[in-house]
Image: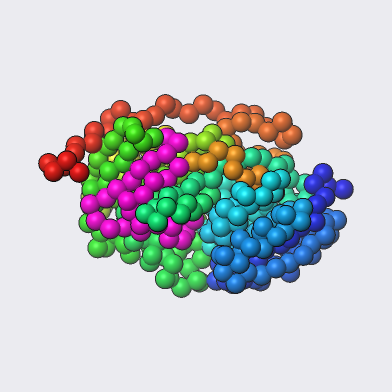
Amino acid sequence: MPELAAPVRLIVNPAAGGGRARRLAPEAVEALRARGLTVKRDDTRDLEHARELAVQAASAGETVVVLSGDGAIGAVAQALRAVPGAVLGVLPGGRGNDLARVLGVPDDMREACATIADGVPRAMDVGEVEGADGEPKTFVGIASAGFDSDANRIANEAPSWLGGLVYAYGALRALVSWKPARIEIELDPPGERRSFSAYTIGAANSKSYGGGMLAAPDAMLDDGLLEVMILESIGKLAFLTKILPNVFKGTHVNQPSVHVFRAREVSIGCDRPFTMYADGDPIGELPLRVRAVAGAVTVLVPRIAPARAAFAQASPLSGERPAPSRPAVPDAGAPPFTPPADGR
């Protein structure tokens, strides 16, 4: 009998992954019941409906299990923050499935369901975006803007048969017409300010986005901090040969054009309009602030930790070792912020 025997509410986004979640849902229900769990399935109409279902289930003492991509997981995580004792389970049902990958949840559905039945509950940070409307929005992975805004928009419009390759496709398409932008950041406002001619600004709660791109290989899900990444302007050939191939291994951060900072909060502005995307969906318009919210939700993770640690602290229940220490940041080599002549 699993240690966590609460009934399961399986929240399915039937449109996720071009219908992948809908196709996998019967297998997930069967696999969860085979492990002795009581399961009720609900399909979502939209993200707001997913939030409503999550609050209803968690308030009834059920484990909320999301079968979808990261966008719906982020929406459910936002709702669960308001329910004491809520527990979140993640099953990969989208195109990217980056949070599941970082947590070590297997892609095979029956194996993934073992995490729901026998997994370890861990407190997990989330990211929060505060836009001009003042309404905070939660994400679980990486929020980014600039070049990533164009790449995400193209990826979201691409045909579903591209699967996980859709994000690389979006990046290549966006590169054709890309022109550098002037991006300004302020770390832990009021704090240090920097200015860059850059491709992208990213604020990472987790390591991965875009279907396995290790954009923030040192990000941890329990340190209360964001990894703030800037890719400075470089030639398009260098982007194609030194950045894009290496981002899948996380070694792009060794390039001199990549700067990494660590902060609880970052304020982001730009010299032209951009939509910020997080977990594959638009989340706000620049300028805005992004912050880390420590221990905001409890998530089920496999008892055997993934090779690349997702948490800085070892779980007392899993026997895993603590993650290795990370290099200190901010990046001393990054250029300082230079205010415009009009003082803005």
Residue 132 picture location, percent across and down: 37, 54
- For image coordinates 38% across by 65% down, the residue present is 153
Q: Is residue 341 above or below residue 73?
A: above
Displayed quadrant of residue 262: top left
Q: Mark yes or no: residue 164 visible.
A: yes
- For image coordinates 27% across by 37% down, the residue present is 194
Outermost left residue: 341
Q: Mark yes or no: residue 206 visible.
A: no
State left or right for residue 160 relative to residue 287.
right
- For image coordinates 51% across by 51% down, the residue present is 138
Residue 337 picture location, percent across and down: 23, 36
Q: Nearer the viewer, residue 141 or 297?
A: 297
Q: Nearer the viewer, residue 121 or 24?
A: 121
- For image coordinates 62% across by 45% down, the residue present is 297
Q: Nearer the viewer, residue 255 or 215?
A: 215
Outermost front residue: 134
State left or right for residue 302 relative to residue 210.
right
Q: Main secondary structure of the magenta part?
A: strand
Residue 333 picture location, percent across and down: 28, 30
Total of numbered circles in the picture? 0
Displayed quadrant of residue 119: top right
Q: Is residue 326 above or below residue 67?
A: above
Residue 26 picture location, percent across and down: 73, 69
Give the magenta range. Answer: 263-291
User: Is 273 covered by the magenta stretch?
Assistant: yes
